[in-house]
């Protein structure tokens, strides 16, 4: 009986030891997980059924941006000669792209339209790339672009430049936030949630360069015009020599 009792005690001790080792291993494995993996797991465990105000605002400001951009920039709501195409022809420099290059804006608006629809779906409405990445920066970019379109059409140079820089800054801040947001590193995530803003930020970098050349030329720092044009600031029909600014 004594031998049997001792054997049972040893078995119980070994069983307890195995359980403790198993718990210890679980703790170690959990501790080895990166913060990114932990965040992704919490996102997966969360029930993504509720649409947030951020999702709704993304749609609202995208629609407003499209209406203002195409209404003023394409359909000339502010009068003849105020479309983006007319103004681009009016102020040409050596860096002015061909007309076909502006088709990139179709890609930008289509991709962002797809994003606004996708981010309403249960799978993506609470995705880290939307909540922690896009955040409210896309809304700020839309507001700035809504301000840029009429100021550019009316040739309000200082105001349009401020709006343009704000668009660029908001998009760069969005990309910065997405870079540090938890990512599942899938093609779907890239094309649906990241590409629309990456291509927009890239084209805005070129737009800033284009406007910089226009301003330099108007103030006679450089001479890159393809033809004689009306100075945007002094509105005189000859090459501006900078003396009127």
Image (cartoon, helix red, strand yellow):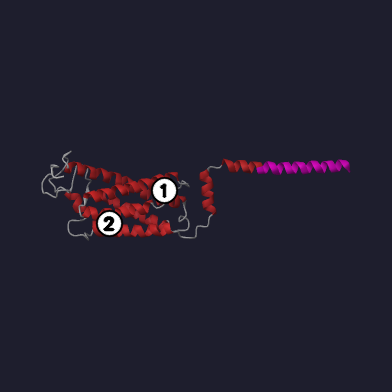
Task: Judge whether residue 111 can be spotted in this image.
Answer: no
Left or right side of 14 for 188: left
Bounds of the magenta span? 1-23
Percent position (x, y) of residue 146?
Answer: 29, 55
Query: Which residue is at a point 35% across and 48% down the rendered structure image?
Result: 171
Is residue 190 among what the camera can see? yes
- Front residue of 205/186: it is 205
Q: Give the answer, above or below, for where 63 lies relative to 18.
A: below
Image point 47% across, 52% down: which residue? 127
- Most extreme residue toward the right, as rendered? 1
Horizontal side of residue 227 vs 147, given as left or right: left
Q: Secondary structure at mark 1?
A: helix
Q: Indicate the quadrant containing the N terminus: top left, top right, bottom left or bottom right.
A: top right
Mark 1 nearby-residue class (10 Å; few <14, some 14–19, many ≥20) = some
Residue 140 coordinates in the image, percent (x, y): 35, 52
Instruction: Tell me: residue 206, above or below residue 116.
Output: above
As drawn, the label of residue 190 is 1
- The image quadrant where one finds the C terminus is top left
In space, the residues marked 2 and 1 are separated at their CA atoms by 26 Å
**Front disc: 2 or 1:** 2
Disc number placed over residue 69 in the picture, else none? 2
Query: Is residue 76 found left or right of 135 in the rendered image?
Result: left
| Residue 67 location, quadrant | bottom left
**Element type where label 2 sits in the image:** helix
User: Which residue is more in the foreground, 78 or 2?
Assistant: 78
Q: Residue at x 36, y 56 (%)?
A: 113
């Amino acid at each position: 009986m004594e031998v049997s009792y001792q054997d049972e005690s040893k078995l119980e001790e070994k069983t307890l030891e195995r359980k403790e080792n198993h718990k210890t291993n679980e703790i170690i494995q959990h501790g080895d997980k990166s913060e990114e993996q932990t965040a992704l797991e919490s996102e997966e465990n969360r029930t993504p059924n509720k649409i947030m105000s951020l999702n709704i605002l993304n749609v609202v400001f995208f629609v407003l941006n499209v209406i203002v951009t195409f209404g003023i920039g394409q359909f000339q709501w502010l009068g003849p000669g105020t479309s983006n195409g007319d103004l681009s022809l009016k102020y040409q420099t050596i860096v002015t792209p061909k007309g076909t290059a502006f088709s990139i804006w179709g890609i930008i608006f289509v991709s962002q339209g797809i994003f606004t629809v996708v981010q309403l779906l249960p799978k993506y409405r609470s995705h880290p790339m939307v909540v922690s990445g896009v955040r409210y920066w896309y809304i700020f970019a839309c507001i700035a672009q809504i301000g840029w379109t009429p100021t550019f059409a009316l040739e309000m140079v200082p105001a349009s430049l401020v709006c343009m820089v704000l668009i660029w800054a908001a998009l760069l801040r969005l990309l910065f936030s997405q870079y540090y947001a938890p990512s599942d590193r899938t093609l779907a995530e890239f094309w649906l949630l990241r590409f629309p803003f990456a291509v927009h930020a890239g084209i805005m970098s070129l737009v800033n360069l284009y406007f910089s050349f226009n301003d330099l030329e108007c103030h006679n720092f450089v001479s890159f015009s393809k033809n004689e044009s009306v100075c945007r600031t002094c509105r005189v029909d000859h090459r501006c020599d900078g003396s009127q600014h």
